[in-house]
Amino acid sequence: MSLRFHEIAESRHRILNPLSHDKLNLLGEICHIRSGTRQLDLACGKGEMLSRWASRYGLQGVGVDLSSTFLDAAKKRATDLGVSDQVSFVEADARTYETEADSYDIVSCIGATWIGGGLTGTLDLMRRPLRRDGIALVGECFWQSPPPAEVYETMEIPEGTFTSLAGTAEQLESAGFELVEMVLADPDSWDRYVASQWWTLSDWLRANPDDSDAPAIRDFLDKSRRAHLQYGRQYLGWGVFVARQ
């Protein structure tokens, strides 16, 4: 899906993944954030995690994302919460963004492991800016049970992209990280993330019937509904995995 499609589909979202507001707060508590904790969030979207944690705990953060649309929303959110002096947002490719080594207490990539070509490659990107005793937060899908072959085709997920929950822990370990905690999405939070996009996309199509992208967006909407209802709720899990080197 193109960046523009994401910007349209998630235009009404504040959190751009299947994590509920309560579970985002729980994740912050798990991380034991203190005033002055420094976080780098790669592919930060609208920056809700950084701004909320800056407001709650006094965190200092930097968010990196390709979307100027999402970053505009992130900056507004930081202003609304009174934390624009604590967090900053950079329009850049998270895959190539350069920063000082060993400079962040938390490095996160929540639901965008495509930046490193998968979980292992993304952990490699996160390793350099992370302090030796820091925390890595990575949001990733996993299979709740082995999916039949038709799931890959219907959901347009190449085989081997994700593994089981236990397999995810093994990938973390193989990359030199220890899994120490996790916060998993549930079916309701999946619905709120995926299904709420359907109404947003339907409204956009009604308002923009002559847009050049309208046929592709309608196709995406149809496929999204079918994939989630037929297979996604049953087979696909998602969570944020808390790890350290």
Image (cartoon, rainbow, N blue to C red):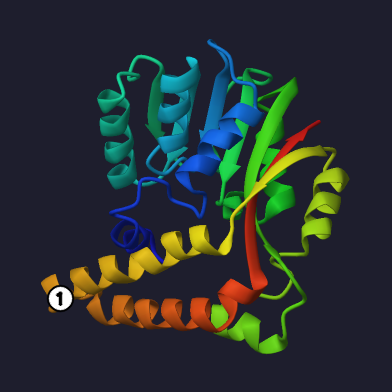
What residue is shown at x 56% (from left), y 24% (from top)?
39
**Could one spot residue 9 in this view of the protein?**
yes
Compared to residue 131, the image places residue 135 above or below, namely below
Q: Nearer the viewer, residue 175 or 92?
A: 175
Mark 1, residue position: 206
Number of numbered discs visible in the structure rendering: 1
The residue drawn where x is 72% and y is 68% is: 144
Figure quadrant of residue 101: top right
Relative to 146, is 57 on the left or the right? Answer: left
| SS class, disc 1 | helix
**Residue 222 pos. (x, y %):** 38, 83
Considering the image in quadrants, where does the C terminus appear?
top right
Residue at 47%, 35% (x, y): give it. Answer: 49
> Is disc 1 surrounded by few (<14), some (14 to 19) or many (20+) residues within 10 Å?
few
Q: Nearer the viewer, residue 145 or 214?
A: 145
Q: Is residue 126 above or below residue 163?
A: above
Q: Position of residue 73 (x, y in %)?
A: 28, 39
Q: Residue furthest bottom?
A: 150
Image spot of residue 82 (x, y percent): 30, 19
Amino acid type, callout 1: Arg
Is 143 placed left or right of 68 in the picture?
Answer: right
- Is residue 157 at all visible to an observer of this figure? no
Percent position of residue 172, x then y: 80, 46
